[in-house]
Image: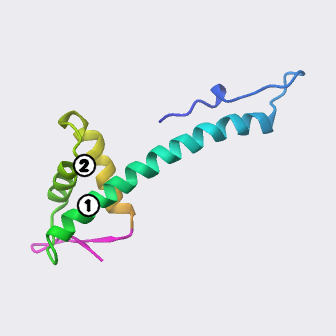
Amino acid sequence: MKINLVDYVVRNDSGDIDHEATLNKFMGDLCSWEQDNLQENRFIAEAVDKVFDENPNVKLVKPVVVMMAFNKLGFPASEFSKMEKKISDYLANSGRFVAIRGAHGGIQRK
């Protein structure tokens, strides 16, 4: 989602930016965006957890984790590239997984 601040600017009668009204206008969209993304992140977390629950004590390479989680999410194939990035970002940024490099490497839960 790209934000164009001009779309949110509210001006008062003298033409100056009304900061409070502008922030209130933005806050509504921010809250909607946050809810949508939090819900999607919960679904991704559940799918990734299922992958590791089904493969306990196994290191999995990232493409395998991503594909298995994507399949569990049930999205159509046309959504793969978008969801691949979101699943990869979740793996990298959730703080719940560790990536081990080398011949016997892969991703595992902490």
The answer to whether the residues at label 2 and label 1 have Cβ atoms under 8 Å apart is no
Q: Tell me, for residue 48, which label it has, or none.
A: 1
Rendered view: 106 above or below 85: below
Q: Tell me, for residue 8, which label it has, or none.
A: none
Residue 102 falls in which quadrant of the image? bottom left
Q: Which of marks 2 and 1 is in front?
A: 2
Q: Quadrant of the C terminus?
A: bottom left
Residue depicted at x 21% and y 33%:
78
- Regarding mark 2 in the picture, which secondary structure is present there? helix
Rendered view: 3 above or below 55: above
Segment tinted magenta in the rendering = 95-110
In the image: residue 42, left or right of residue 55:
right
CA gap between label 2 and label 1 equals: 9 Å
> Does residue 8 belong to the magenta stretch?
no
- Regarding mark 1 in the picture, which secondary structure is present there? helix
Q: Where is residue 104 in the image (x, y as percent from the top left)?
A: 10, 75
Rendered view: 16 above or below 23: above
Residue depicted at x 16% and y 78%:
57
Residue depicted at x 58% and y 44%:
31
Q: Position of residue 86 (x, y in %)?
A: 33, 49
Check disc 2 and report the residue beneath it: 73
Badge 2 amino acid: Leu
Q: Position of residue 100 (x, y in %)?
A: 22, 73
